[in-house]
Image (cartoon, rainbow, N blue to C red):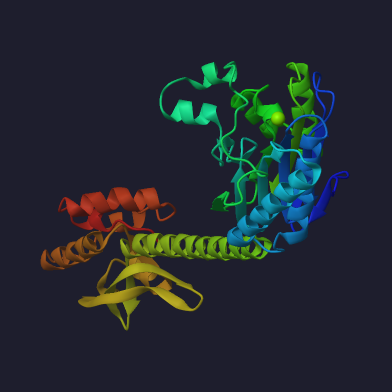
Amino acid sequence: MPRPSANRVHSGTMFGSRTDIGCVREHNEDSLVVAPPLYAVADGMGGHAAGEVASEVAVRSLAENAPSTVDSEGLGNAVMTANYAVINAAQEKGRNGMGTTMTAALLERDKLAIAQVGDSRAYLLHQGTLQQITRDHSLMADMIEAGEITPEEARVHPQRSVITRALGSDPDMQPDLYEINVSAGDRLLLCSDGLTTMLEDSEIEKILIRTRDPQRCASILVNEAIAAGGHDNVTVIVVDVEGDRERQVKKTKRKGRAWAVVIVLALIATVLGVCYGAYTYTQSTAYLADENGKVAVYQGVPDTVLGISLSHLDHVTDVNVDDLQPGVSARLKEGVIRADSLDAANSLVDGYQEDFAAGKKPTAEAEQLDASTDAAASSSSADASAGSTSSAQGGTLQ
Ligand code: MG
């Protein structure tokens, strides 16, 4: 019979196992097989020697006949073959009543198949929650399902060890079969009733969650069952599911690509947002400039970025630059006069034209403009909007 060694990694799984006689029994009638992808627990019955033989014959037959891939039907056939092997062994030894449970699992990547007979169990720890996969073939399970007793009452019921299906007696015995998709990080537990009669599922769950190493986990589970009384032989197999590595790698790559796309799109959106904000700001301002001797109104700012102009000509007025007050005229010839908005720039021109209509050149007040700050421009532009004349020449010299 294959026996477990220390933890080993095989086919993307890591496992641990342990079996113990317990505190009361004189013999260990449990057997187990750990031969990845095959894992199984068998709990023999029939008295001294018979139980040990039954479970050992069963797991040996199972190991010889189980498929090497996750195939629930093939696993079920192997369990039925083991059933015949136990029946034959019982007849050869003249031991009627010799039998065994069998909880067998095939686990590879993200596929799990289970064949179940009796009251040994398979559990799956998934995302921190322990779920019993198999249904017990026992009188207690039947009575609980019928609502006749509670699980707590079953735990101390005098007939709690009566099982309703086993290997070794009925040639037509059929195992229950399960096929389950599992995920990386899941943990499979196979155990005999020596564990589940001693520990509550919640206690088992806590140990499975907090003990990372599967071999240490299996040992702790057995130790706790013994500490709780060890009334029966106790056998535990813990198998960690690593899942489909190729799928995991592809999934990780897909996630990485998706994140890269998101980051690039976010950067593009940020750059576009900044550019749009800057462009919007520049287009909210205006300035006056000398356009072939005429005062021209531009929208934007008199700058370029990467060779791209940040302004465009709105219109050329009929105001001659040379007709303006000398200081203003000189500024336009040397640079531009900024305004807070297109309206403010037009108001400046209106002021010039009103001065001309009144028969005078724009006053020297224009020369008092403080061309050093935008604040000055803003203040003067506000005056311009209010209809002032020469004082409306608010702006900053560029
Ligand atoms: Mg037992």
In the image, 321 versus 55, the foreground residue is 55
Q: In this view, does 329 lie to the left or right of 149?
A: left
Q: Residue at x 57, y 60 (%)?
A: 255
Q: Position of residue 386 (x, y in %)?
A: 16, 50
What x and y, as percent, mark residue 16? 79, 42
Residue 16 in view (yes/no): no
Q: Is residue 172 or residue 123 the one in the foreground?
A: 172
For ligand 1, the image quadrant comes to top right
Q: Position of residue 348 (x, y in %)?
A: 23, 62
Count the labels in the image. 0
Left or right of 242 on screen, residue 3: right
Query: To which quarter of the image does residue 65 belong?
Result: bottom right
In the image, farthest residue toward the front: 94
Relative placement, left or right, of 119 versus 240 is left
Classify 395 as above or below 205.
below
Quadrant of the frame with the C terminus:
bottom left
Examine the rendered structure and indicate whether residue 248 appears above or below residue 201: below
In the image, 237: left or right of 305? right
- Residue 328: tell me if it is visible: yes
Image: 318 above or below 239: below
The spot of residue 168 in percent (x, y) is 68, 44
Residue sitting at x 78%, y 21%: 226
Q: Residue furthest left?
A: 357
x 76%, y 54%: residue = 61
Q: Which of 311 and 45 is in front in this view?
A: 45
Q: Which residue of the protein is positioned furthest toward the bottom in this rendering?
A: 292
In depth, the one of 23 and 50 nearer the eye is 50
